[in-house]
Image: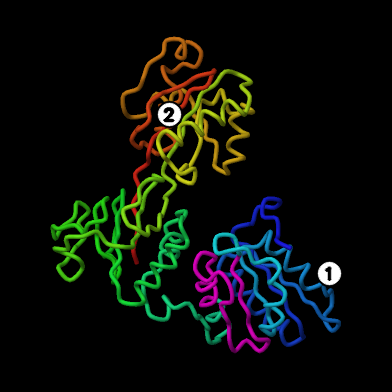
Amino acid sequence: MKADREQTPRRSGRLSILCFSLTGWATGQRLAKGLRACGYEVFLDGKSRYLQDSISQSTQEWTGMQFLQAEGIIFVGACGIAVRSIAPFVAGKKQDPAVLVADECGRFVISLLSGHLGGANELTQRAADILGAVPVITTATDLHHRFAVDVFAKKNRCAIFHMKAAKELSAALLAGEQAGFYSEYPWEGPLPEGLVLCKRDGYPVKNTKTEYGAEASKERGFGQDRPLRIGVAVTIHKNCMPFESTVQVVPPVVAVGMGCRKGKEKEAVKDMAEQLLAEEGLYKEAVLALASHELKKEEPGLLALSDEWNVPFCTFLPQELLGAPGEFTPSAFVEQVTGVDNVCERSAVCASGGGRLFVRKRGGGGVTIAAARKEWRAYFE
């Protein structure tokens, strides 16, 4: 039985700990106290006849609920209990929460599931520091100190696509093969070992300095006359596939500004938004917010789309919209009704933090839409 992830949104920062003995309870209390001091919301439970207020449901039932609600689960007890408990609910790297196991004496903390995207490896190190325990981390890229694209995506708060390619990338880097790196956005920090700066066609960059100031040395691909086989593309475009095997890392940088007639049905609003994404070849995961005039703050269609896409819906006062930088498509009718000459373009720019308008006003069926892209950069540690 797979847990239904759509029923209950997982709460960021929530950790659930389950202990199975009196000794384990003492260890769990130490761990909970330390994690709370780090800013986590921690729930501590026990499952034993010797523990007061032991949970009544089975361990597996408890685990299923935590898979729906918690960002991380920590079992204080034997690995076997943890493995049997989580087995029915494991779905995949993109869905699973972090799962850790600590022995009841607090000597070892093991990263069991979702080490990278779920953050189990990082949480394991933190828990081990709290307990004075030995962290046990078995992911190969960590052991060999190689670039892990899923960790890069998570730390930059990006979505990631083509997980098969991500596995191939890790395998290639571990085998000493070079991999390409292409980005539509600037970055800070040197490219990790094994990555070669490439153009959008997958060919390595020939000059030693990039427009972003990153180095592309002779040892890292300078002078190669063929595209690299595998690599990473930081992009918001679905068709950006520079390499035969491309992992796409998608930053949330697009603000979608919308206007509509009062009471416009959700389907019309959604259709217009989906049409924009399709025509521009954008990932939905690239959308950081929907935006409009404050007059639309209770507009059902816009609110429904915001809920469905799980992005904020931002509204702005007329004076805020008038302060948006740039040139906009004016409408005398819109100005008469709202006090500003354009809603969708101006609100997109405002929601993007003063970013660049790259989709100008378009519309139909009583809905208008535009999009702006915020300034953003990736970070390598």
Element under label 2?
strand
- Residue 328 vs residue 102: left or right? left
Residue 360, by quadrant, is: top left
Give the mark nearest the N terminus, 1 or 2: 1
Amino acid type of disc 1? Gln
Q: Residue at x 72, y 80 (%)?
A: 81
Label 1 environment density (alpha carbons within 10 Å; few <14, some 14–19, many ≥20): few
Where in the figure is residue 195, as x and y percent of width and height?
29, 66
Residue 279, by quadrant, is: top left
> Does the stretch in magenta take in 107?
yes
Where in the figure is residue 240, as x and y percent of width and height?
35, 48
Q: Residue at x 41, y 75 (%)?
A: 141
Q: Which mark is residue 57?
A: 1
Q: Looking at the rendering, in which quadrant would you find the N terminus?
A: bottom right
| Image position of 109 with respect to 9: above or below | below
Q: Which mark is residue 38?
A: none
Q: Which residue is label 2 attached to? A: 370
* The magenta segment: 97-126
Where in the figure is residue 381, as x and y percent of width and height?
34, 67
Amino acid type of disc 2? Ala
The CA distance from mark 1 to mark 2 is 50 Å
Residue 347, by quadrant, is: top left
- Residue 231 vs residue 198: left or right? right
Q: Nearer the viewer, residue 238 or 187?
A: 238
Q: Residue at x 65, y 52 (%)?
A: 9
The colour scheme of the drawn protein is rainbow
Element under label 1?
loop
| Image position of 7 with respect to 259: above or below | below
